[in-house]
Image (cartoon, helix red, strand yellow):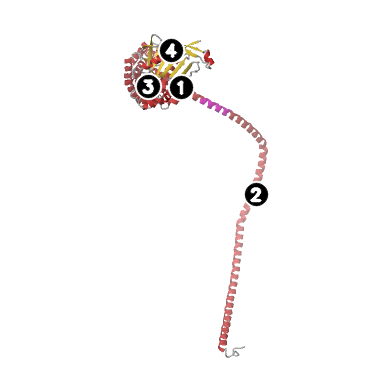
């Protein structure tokens, strides 16, 4: 028996039983085929792209019916959590732009969604003798964490932002590591069948990562941006799409000098403020565009957006840092110094704030 | 039989025939006379022509002789000059032949040495070319590697930059 800490991801099609009732057998089979193909493309490409060896060495995954299971145990838990969040967002993005959902969208019906549950915990990796007898010698993953994650996933229907739910174990680890730029909702205490006590569940409210679009499989990249753009023009766009799309625009703006990208990003950003519940990230994106966007630079506007972000979340480190930089660029030395000190109050180890304060002190 | 002896019954016919014969004789005589006269004129003309022709030939011969004489007179100094030049050319040919022979005697060993050096040079040149070629391939391979490395560094820079942006949003 070998014990290890794994990050577990469960994903399935929401309301698939109801769909099965309303669709013909052929239509249901088409949907399931499309779902499984999409999951296969995304997960196999992602694990390969991020150098997971698979075969039970550091990961394993399977698709069964309308359910996807992914186990990551590379011995770097933060790496696994980050990848689980990436996989979760990527499968949601790929399913939204799948043939099945594009057809649904063209008929102006509600799209089929994927609910995701992620958690970390101790698991047992063991090669059972019966598996060897049937020619499957790779270890089996078992443990309470798997059962719990399955139940967390079932709570995703109650979510209203990403519909990616996580358990307390994963939540705590993300709080310890600011490199995974993810934020969560307040916990919901839910009672799950067979567990006998209330379990806190958190919903992902923003996950900012440039790799979501850029590391999608090549076969799914063609026309992806256009599909996602058309989705946000929909009457009821899902909030998480705005964050993915805006982050993608920032990458494009960063790598090119296209004025249209900046303008489009500002327009979608304004739209996102009306749709997205967790607004600090949108304010920060708008502030970033006005600070670094080559064609829409306006430091007063940028300052205003970062200020709005801090109004909602006074400890938002990204907004504090950007505000300090803007003050510095505006020639407001004292205010900038004060802003950097404010960052150090939150995080004494912040490398940029420490360096800046040291510079101010040596200049005196 | 004469006209007087012709039978009386055919007197007029005979007379007519006699006149015709007479007229024919007269015409013949006249024609003969005219012909002789024409022939005499022709002969005279022929003689004149022959005379003229002889005269022309004589003139032509004279002219040709005069021309030959004149040409001879004119080419006489040239011929001596040509002879002189020809002699000089021969002398020069003889001299250059001697010089060539002398040079060949001197250059022979030198040529062998040059050939030898040339062969050695070609061999070294081939060796150097081979080394240069190999070096060139190696440099090209290294340049490609550097280029790939540069791209990788650029990708890493972008990755770091994008990662930093993530944390600033």
Q: From the viewer's perspective, is the residue at label 4 or at label 3 nearer?
A: 4
For marks 4 and 3 on the same chain, the one whose residue lies earlier in the sequence: 4
> Residue B106 appears at what percent x and percent y?
67, 37
Q: Which of the numbered marks, if any, corresponds to residue A147?
A: 4
Residue at 64% in and 34% down: B115
Residue at 53% in and 25% down: B142
**Alpha carbons under labels 1 and 4: distance apart:** 23 Å
Q: Secondary structure at mark 2?
A: helix
Q: From the viewer's perspective, is the residue at label 1 or at label 4 nearer?
A: 4
Q: Which residue is mark 1?
A: A40
**Alpha carbons under labels 2 and 1: distance apart:** 105 Å
**Alpha carbons under labels 2 and 3: distance apart:** 110 Å
Query: Do the residues indicated by labels 1 and 4 lie within the same chain of the protein?
Result: yes
> Residue B61 appears at what percent x and percent y?
61, 64
Q: Nearer the viewer, residue A66 or A364?
A: A66
Q: Residues within 10 Å of mark 4 (few under 14, many from 20)?
A: few
Q: Nearer the viewer, residue A51 or A364?
A: A51
**Does residue A8 belong to the magenta stretch?**
no
Which chain does tag 4 point to? A
**Alpha carbons under labels 4 and 3: distance apart:** 29 Å
Q: Residues within 10 Å of mark 2 (few under 14, many from 20)?
A: few
């Amino acid at each position: 028996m070998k014990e290890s800490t794994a990050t577990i991801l469960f994903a399935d099609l929401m309301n698939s039983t109801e769909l099965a009732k309303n669709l013909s057998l052929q239509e249901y089979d088409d949907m399931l085929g499309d779902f499984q193909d999409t999951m296969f493309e995304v997960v196999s490409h992602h694990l390969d792209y991020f150098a997971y060896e698979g075969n039970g060495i550091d990961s394993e995954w399977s698709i069964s019916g309308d359910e996807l299971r992914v186990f990551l145990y590379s011995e770097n838990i933060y790496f696994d959590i980050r990848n689980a969040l990436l996989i979760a967002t990527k499968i949601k993005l790929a399913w939204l732009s799948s043939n099945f959902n594009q057809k649904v969208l063209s008929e102006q019906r509600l799209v089929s969604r994927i609910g995701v549950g992620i958690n970390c915990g101790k698991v047992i990796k063991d090669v059972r003798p019966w598996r060897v007898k049937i020619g499957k010698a790779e270890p089996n993953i078992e443990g309470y964490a798997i059962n719990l994650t399955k139940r967390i996933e079932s709570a995703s229907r109650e979510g209203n932002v990403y519909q990616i739910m996580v358990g307390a174990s994963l939540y705590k680890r993300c709080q310890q590591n600011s490199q995974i730029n993810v934020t969560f909702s307040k916990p919901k205490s839910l009672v799950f069948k067979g567990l006998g006590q209330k379990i806190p569940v958190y919903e992902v409210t923003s996950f900012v990562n440039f790799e979501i679009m850029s590391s999608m499989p090549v076969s799914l990249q063609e026309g992806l941006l256009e599909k996602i753009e058309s989705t946000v023009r929909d009457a009821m766009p899902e909030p998480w799409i705005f964050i993915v799309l805006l982050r993608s625009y920032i990458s494009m703006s960063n790598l090119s000098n296209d004025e249209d990208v900046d303008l489009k990003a500002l327009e979608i950003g304004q739209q996102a403020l009306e749709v997205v519940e967790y607004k600090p990230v949108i304010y920060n994106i708008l502030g970033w565009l006005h600070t670094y966007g080559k064609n829409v630079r306006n430091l007063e506007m940028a300052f205003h957006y970062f200020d709005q972000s801090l109004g909602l979340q006074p400890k938002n480190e990204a907004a504090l840092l950007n505000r300090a930089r803007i003050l510095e660029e505006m020639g407001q030395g004292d205010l900038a110094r004060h802003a950097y000190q404010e960052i150090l109050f939150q995080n004494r180890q912040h490398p940029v704030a420490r360096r800046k304060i040291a510079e101010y002190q040596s200049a005196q | 039989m004469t006209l007087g002896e012709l039978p009386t019954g055919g007197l007029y016919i005979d007379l007519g025939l006699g006149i015709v014969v007479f007229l024919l004789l007269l015409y013949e005589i006249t024609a003969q006379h005219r012909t002789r006269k024409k022939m005499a004129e022709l002969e005279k003309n022929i003689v004149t022509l022959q005379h003229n022709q002889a005269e022309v030939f004589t003139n032509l011969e004279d002219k040709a002789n005069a021309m030959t004489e004149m040409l001879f007179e004119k080419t006489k100094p040239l011929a001596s000059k040509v002879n002189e030049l020809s002699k000089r050319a021969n002398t020069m040919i003889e001299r250059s032949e001697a010089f060539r022979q002398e040079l060949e005697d001197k250059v022979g060993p030198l040529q062998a040495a040059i050939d030898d050096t040339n062969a050695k040079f070609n061999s070294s040149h081939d060796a150097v070319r081979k080394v240069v070629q190999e070096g060139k391939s190696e440099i090209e391979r290294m340049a490609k590697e550097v280029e790939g490395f540069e791209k990788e560094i650029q990708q890493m820079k972008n990755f770091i930059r994008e990662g930093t942006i993530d944390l600033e949003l």
